[in-house]
Image (tube, coloured by chain):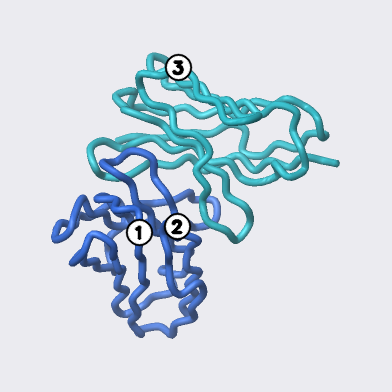
Amino acid sequence: NAGVTQTPKFRILKIGQSMTLQCAQDMNHNYMYWYRQDPGMGLKLIYYSVGAGITDKGEVPNGYNVSRSTTEDFPLRLELAAPSQTSVYFCASSYEGFEAFFGQGTRLTVV
Amino acid sequence: KQEVTQIPAALSVPEGENLVLNCSFTDSAIYNLQWFRQDPGKGLTSLLLIQSSQREQTSGRLNASLDKSSGRSTLYIAASQPGDSATYLCAAPGGGADGLTFGKGTHLIIQP
C-alpha cells in the first residue's frame, strides 16, 4: 500500500519558471491537502479539496494553483516561481477530515 | 482561527526517562487531534489520533490525552529510547474541511 506519493522529491527552479508538484493517493480518501513547511514557521495550508472537482484556498494560496480531476490526484502548480516559494511541500489526504496521512515531501529551491 | 502551541520547543533527556510533550489549542470545538512524528528531511508519520469523545489513546510506549475544556493535549513517551529522537508535531482541525493547524513542534533528543 503506497499511501500518499509525491514527485519529485527535490527540484531547483529559476526565478520565473513554472512547475507542477504531483501528488497521488491510493487510499480512496476524499479530502486532500497541500501544505508548505518553512524552518521555524510550522506547516501552513496552501489549498485543499473535499472531492473531485472541488478545491478551496487555505492560509497561503498566493502564487499557487490546484486542480482535482480525479479522487486519486491533486497536483499543485507554481506559476512564475519566486524565492519566497523556496520550501518543503507536503501533500496529505484523509477520509472525511479524520486521520491525515502525509507524503514524503518535495524540497523546492528557487534561485 | 485555530492556533496551536507546543511546549517545550526543544527537549534533551537521557535514555530511559519518561517524558511529556505539551500541546495547547485555542478553539476547543474540535472533533479530533492528531500527533505526528517527523524525522529530519522526512515526511510526517501519524502517531496517534484522538477523537473528541476519547480522553486517551495509546500505541505502544506512547499515550496521548485530550482535554477539550482546557484546550490541552499531552503526549507521554515511556522509557524513552535514542530512536525516539525526532520532532513531534501536534495538529488540530481548523474547522470544517480546511485542514489541520499545526504547532511548531517539539524537537526531542534522547541521549544514549
Q: Colour of chain A?
A: blue
- From this viewpoint, which residue is outermost toward the left? A53
Distance from disc 2 to disc 3, alpha carbons, whole Å, reads 31 Å
Query: Which residue is label 2 attached to?
Result: A1
> From the viewer's perspective, is the residue at label 2 or at label 3 nearer?
2
User: Looking at the colours in the rendered structure, which chain would you say is drawn in cyan?
Assistant: B
**Labels 2, 1: one chain:** yes
Residue type, label 3: Arg
Element class at badge 3: loop
- The amino acid type found where label 1 is placed reads Asp
Give the x, y percent position of residue B58. 55, 26
The residue singled out by tag 3 in the image is B55
Q: Nearer the viewer, mark 3 or mark 1?
A: 1
Q: Are marks 2 and 3 in contact (CB under 8 Å)?
A: no
Residue B10 location in percent, x, y? 67, 39
Q: Mark 1 and mark 2 in contact (Cβ < 8 Å)?
A: yes
Q: What amino acid is at disc 2?
A: Asn
**Labels 2 and 1: the sequence-earlier one:** 2
- The residue singled out by tag 1 in the image is A26
Q: Is residue A49 left or right of residue B79?
A: left
Tell me the residue at 28%/62% (across/down). A72
